């Protein structure tokens, strides 16, 4: 109750600020960022932690075969019958050899599918003493779509588990198929973490694989439940302290899991559960009453469930004779006179239904306590969706907008009701609503006060002095929030507004302010979850001091100061920083807040805050990050020497077969096309759907190797060109160029720079694009065209002038030029500090009467400048992300080197200058990374244009920072640092080259200075 009261005081301070809030969308995230910082939990794995319904478990880990899908043993039994093979042969052969048998080696990817089938077939033949056993057909059956289907009961259970905020994982002994993809016939989106033995090279029951899974979940063993069908796997899990469930049959296992978790795993009537013993009501008399009320003669049994919400006024679901009903009653015992007034709820819903406000259809108010022990009322059950998490995870931005628009629309309807017409003039006192509320809450707070809270004292003084002058009187819902609304399952339409317990006549701004709370509090905040319930009251009460500070800050600092001084349109506002604030009880001392996002949802929700550590990414992206890291360690770094020697060999102008092989592997592991920003590809049609900020962490990791970006199809200039096609290409252009690029079958180049003009000023470009019948004819001289020498290069994105007499920025156009068009003459490969960068190279090239069909024009004549800006924004910041990766690798190499190298009697690391260099490098990397992340974050939040300053700043900072860090590493290495035995020399070369290739430093400086002068006077 105490916390509940406080919520009201807090909401009032929001009421004071509400006009400002509406005028400043930015303010919402300023505040959220500041607040979230406060609430960051120490435990990195605590995502989605508040919905747990009292259970201490935070994740459920599933084995795959035998738990989610049929076990190989069961499939084998079916196959043996079909093929007249003695029963048990396959199982015996699978177990043969134990740890070192073909099956376990196959699970650890030590042998291929072909190798396994060969050995396995031989084993079976030996056992049966026949010439051949058709094990291929067993394998086909095992992996067939017909058999490898997830049990629906498990799908339901997973949905319910995730809806309750727990994480889910698969921990499977699994194998690679002949196509090099792992056998995972599951919807990956169902899981936060997927750990497969073939990818890790470790099988259950090896304890390391369980630990790996827990580490990725960010949990302790005791916080998770593990389901497997095999005793030894469960035994090891239990030994580690994980709670286990043996799965003999999925249905029974789900029941056992339900009992452990304490909530239903069946999708029945949403948000209900069996009636608790203490909440039972007499069914017989209720059935009799309902029969009379509904005029039914015969009925089947009355089905009764209890809603999760609404312990204040207990609420039940009833099914009787095909009628779905809801009963809401007063709680038992002695009640305060004005509390739990269900009669008022009944009255207002009846009145509002007549005024066109969507409310459940109320049927009857029964004030006769002899029926079920207390008065109650009955209404029709309104099926639909209730969104529990105000951040609406998993929905597209446009859908989220529509949901909130519908919410606002219905609130307007409530506030527009004509009180007289619906007979509600006496539903509450008229006028003076907010002062009265403040007085009441202060009185109630004082009555339950246990110690002095300074911020609360300040608020109590401050609020009466800052009340809104003008007040309207309308119906006020009093608890207007998203999870009190029932939505249409397919349309963004509110079907019913629920829970009118706190409704009265008052100032409509109170509802507006209260509904805005969700924008400022993280969805994990307990106040938002059933705040009026006793379950949360104690927990919420503990938060009082914390919330007092929050409300005080909001009222006096953010609500007014930030808005007044920092209008949204000013790109130089500093409001997006992650604030370092004192630790609170909600953020235990000693923990380091890496992210302003305490709770990550299955969808990519990092949009709300600046995530500065990969460990704070949402679980699926974090899992992707770890998968990439593992791939880098297992596949990419070990391949570097061979890839480098290919680049120095006579065959260097042909692509390395090893790169092609690694590309296939990366594709199979889902580490492909990660670069395309969610904002350019909101439906994730083409890419992985990461935000720029999420990608920043992955791109940095790829940047630690010169080869990884290409391996993962994330390398320049293809990335920029693909984004250009996604953003501006026609469907025909996409089909012809984008698809092969996305598949990694083709490569491309971007031709803008010209030797005869200063190309850092793109308006200088002279190449001509002339119309001739249904063609454009190109003439021009270009150089530094990266990738043009690659035999796989099929597309040249060409920039030239269609109209030299048009306005300066309307002269250029972009044409898609097939590389096999006659007239393209490559003159020579240029070198960077002597490096050719084969097979793509950097070419000097002439375009002589190159005829290109008119439909190859992008967007239209004169739009080239606009396109180049769009293309180069995100693409260029990718270079900065990679430069952080270069620098991290250089520093790591340097640290290892100076620890092992001894000069003048002691390791180099003991030299003060070396220590100073290491420290300097660490500081510079961290500074630059923060700037990269901030630019990426702003691009996500406000778009590339609004982030122009941050993009320019990081382009100014990152290449020279990387050059300095790499140079220090080279120095520490001695002469070896200059050799090709280490990647340092190449890193240095590319970091230096990027001070031109990404536009000269001076141009970025000019941009920063221009914006600084424009907005900072
Ligand atoms: C490795 C590499 C790869 C490249 N890949 C491509 C590619 O794929 N496609 C492509 O079209 N181009 C590419 N380029 C070219 C690159 O984009 C240009 O080099 C760059 O835009 C600069 O143009 P410029 O060389 O003509 O220098 P110029 O424009 O001649 O400038 C020379 C110098 O003038 C100074 N300067 C310029 N403007 C200002 C200013 N406003 N204030 C103060 N000083 C200034 C700077 O010091 C600058 O370095 C690549 C370059 C490199 C090194």
Image: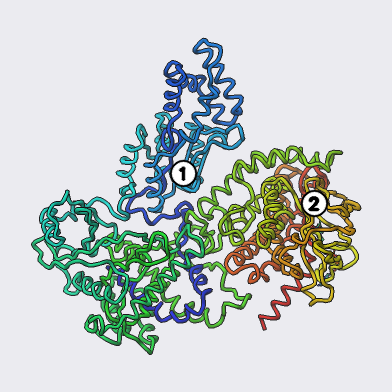
Q: Please, is residue 101 above or below residue 555 in the view?
A: above
Front residue of 416 and 342:
416
Asked if ligand 1 lies within 8 A of label 2, the reply is yes
Ligand 1's image quarter is: bottom right
Front residue of 679 and 5:
679
Q: Please, is residue 614 above or below residue 770 in the view?
A: above
Element class at badge 1: strand
Q: Judge left or right: residue 880 versus residue 148.
A: right
Measured from the top left, where is residue 317 in percent x and y?
Answer: 24, 57
Q: How many marks?
A: 2
Q: Judge left or right: residue 991 versus residue 436.
A: right
Element class at badge 2: loop
Q: Judge left or right: residue 328 versus residue 496.
A: left
Residue drawn at 16 percent across, 61 percent down: 294
Placement of the C terminus among the 4 image quadrants: bottom right
Measured from the top left, where is residue 358 in percent x and y?
Answer: 32, 70
Q: Which residue is mark 2?
A: 787
Q: Which residue is mark 1?
A: 169
For label 2, count other residues whose C-alpha is less than 10 Å away and answer few (under 14), some (14-19) or many (20+).
Answer: many
**Which residue sits furthest front?**
773
Q: Judge left or right: residue 765 versus residue 192.
A: right
């Amino acid at each position: 109750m105490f916390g509940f009261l406080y919520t009201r005081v807090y909401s009032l301070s929001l009421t004071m600020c509400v006009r400002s809030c509406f005028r400043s969308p930015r303010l919402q995230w300023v505040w959220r960022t500041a607040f979230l910082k406060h609430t960051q939990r120490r435990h990195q794995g605590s995502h989605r932690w508040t919905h747990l319904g009292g259970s201490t478990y935070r994740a459920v880990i599933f084995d795959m075969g035998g738990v989610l899908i049929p076990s190989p043993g069961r499939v084998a039994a079916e196959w043996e019958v079909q093929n007249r093979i003695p029963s048990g042969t396959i199982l015996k052969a699978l177990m043969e050899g134990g740890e070192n048998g073909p099956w376990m080696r196959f699970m650890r990817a030590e042998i291929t599918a072909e190798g396994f089938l060969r050995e396995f077939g031989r084993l079976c033949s030996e056992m049966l003493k026949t010439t051949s056993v058709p094990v291929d057909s067993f394998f086909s059956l095992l992996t067939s779509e017909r058999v490898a289907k997830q049990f629906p009961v498990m799908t339901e259970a997973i949905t319910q588990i995730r809806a309750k905020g727990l994480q889910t994982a698969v921990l499977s002994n699994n194998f690679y198929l002949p196509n090099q993809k792992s056998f995972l016939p599951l919807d990956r989106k169902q899981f936060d973490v997927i750990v497969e033995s073939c990818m890790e090279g470790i099988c259950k029951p090896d304890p390391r694989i369980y630990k790996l899974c827990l580490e990725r979940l960010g949990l302790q063993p005791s916080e998770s439940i593990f389901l497997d069908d095999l005793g030894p796997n469960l035994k090891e899990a239990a030994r580690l302290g994980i709670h286990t469930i043996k799965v003999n049959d999925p249905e029974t296992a789900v029941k056992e899991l339900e009992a452990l978790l304490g909530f239903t795993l069946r999708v029945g009537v949403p948000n209900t559960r069996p009636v608790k013993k203490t909440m039972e009501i007499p069914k017989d008399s209720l059935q009799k009453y309902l029969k009379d009320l509904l005029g039914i003669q015969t009925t089947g049994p009355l089905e009764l469930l209890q809603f999760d919400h609404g312990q204040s006024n207990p609420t039940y679901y009833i099914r009787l004779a095909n009628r779905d009903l809801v009963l809401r009653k007063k709680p038992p015992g002695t009640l305060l006179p004005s509390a739990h007034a269900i009669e008022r709820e009944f009255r207002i819903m009846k009145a509002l239904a007549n005024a066109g406000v969507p409310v459940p259809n109320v049927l009857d108010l029964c004030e006769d306590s002899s029926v079920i022990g207390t008065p109650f009322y009955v209404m029709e059950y309104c099926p639909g969706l209730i969104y529990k998490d105000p951040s609406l995870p998993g929905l597209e931005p446009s859908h989220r907008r529509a949901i909130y628009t519908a919410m606002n629309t219905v609130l307007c309807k409530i506030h527009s009701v004509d009180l007289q017409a619906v007979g509600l003039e006496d539903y509450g006192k008229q006028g003076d609503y907010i002062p009265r509320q403040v007085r009441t809450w202060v009185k109630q707070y004082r009555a339950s006060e246990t110690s002095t809270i300074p911020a609360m004292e300040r608020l109590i003084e401050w609020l009466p002095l800052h009340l809104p002058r003008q007040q309207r009187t309308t119906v006020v819902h009093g608890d207007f929030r998203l999870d009190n609304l029932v939505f249409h399952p397919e349309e963004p339409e509110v079907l019913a507004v629920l829970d009118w317990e706190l409704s009265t006549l008052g100032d409509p701004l109170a509802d507006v302010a209260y509904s805005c709370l969700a924008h400022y509090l993280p969805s994990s905040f307990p106040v938002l979850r059933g705040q009026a319930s006793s379950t949360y009251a104690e927990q919420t009460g503990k938060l009082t001091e914390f919330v007092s500070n929050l409300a005080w800050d909001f009222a006096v600092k953010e609500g007014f100061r930030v808005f007044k001084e920092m209008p949204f349109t000013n790109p130089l506002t500093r409001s997006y920083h992650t604030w370092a604030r004192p630790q609170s009880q909600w953020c235990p001392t000693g923990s380091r807040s890496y992210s302003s996002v305490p709770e990550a949802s299955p969808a990519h929700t990092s949009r709300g805050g600046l995530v500065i550590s990969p460990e704070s990414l949402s679980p699926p992206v974090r899992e992707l990050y770890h998968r990439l890291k593992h791939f880098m360690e297992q596949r990419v770094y070990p391949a570097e020497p061979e890839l480098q020697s290919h680049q120095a060999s006579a065959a260097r102008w042909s692509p390395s077969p090893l790169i092609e092989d690694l590309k296939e592997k990366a594709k199979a592991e889902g580490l492909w096309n990660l670069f395309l920003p969610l904002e350019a590809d909101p439906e994730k049609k083409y890419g992985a759907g990461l935000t720029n900020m999420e990608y920043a962490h992955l791109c940095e990791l790829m940047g630690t190797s010169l080869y990884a970006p290409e391996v993962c199809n994330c390398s320049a200039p293809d990335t920029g060109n693909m984004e250009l096609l996604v953003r501006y290409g026609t469907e025909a252009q996409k089909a012809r160029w984008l698809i092969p690029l996305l598949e990694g079958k083709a490569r491309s180049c971007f031709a803008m720079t010209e030797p005869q003009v200063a190309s850092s000023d793109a308006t200088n470009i002279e190449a001509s694009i002339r119309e001739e019948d249904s063609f454009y004819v190109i003439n021009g001289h270009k150089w530094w065209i990266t990738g043009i020498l690659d035999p796989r290069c099929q597309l040249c994105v060409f920039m030239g002038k269609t109209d030299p007499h048009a306005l300066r920025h309307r002269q250029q156009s972009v044409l898609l030029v097939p590389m096999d068009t006659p007239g393209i003459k490559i003159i020579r490969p240029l070198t960077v500090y002597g490096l050719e960068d084969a097979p793509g190279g950097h070419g000097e090239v002439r375009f002589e009467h190159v005829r290109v069909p008119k439909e190859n024009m992008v967007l239209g004549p004169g739009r080239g400048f606009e396109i180049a800006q769009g293309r180069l924004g995100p693409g260029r910041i990718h270079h900065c992300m990679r430069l952080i990766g270069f620098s991290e690798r250089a520093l790591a190499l340097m640290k290892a080197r100076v620890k092992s190298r001894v000069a003048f009697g002691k390791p180099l690391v003991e030299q003060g200058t070396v220590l100073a260099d290491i420290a300097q490098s660490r500081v510079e990397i961290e500074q630059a990374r923060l700037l990269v992340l901030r630019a990426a974050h702003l691009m996500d939040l406000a778009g590339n244009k609004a982030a122009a300053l941050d993009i320019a700043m990081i382009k100014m900072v990152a290449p020279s920072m990387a050059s300095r860090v790499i140079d220090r590493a080279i120095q520490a290495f001695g002469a070896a640092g200059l050799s090709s035995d280490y990647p340092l020399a190449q890193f240095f070369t590319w970091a230096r080259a990027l001070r031109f290739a990404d536009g000269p430093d001076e141009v970025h400086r000019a941009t920063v200075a221009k914006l600084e002068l424009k907005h900072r006077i």
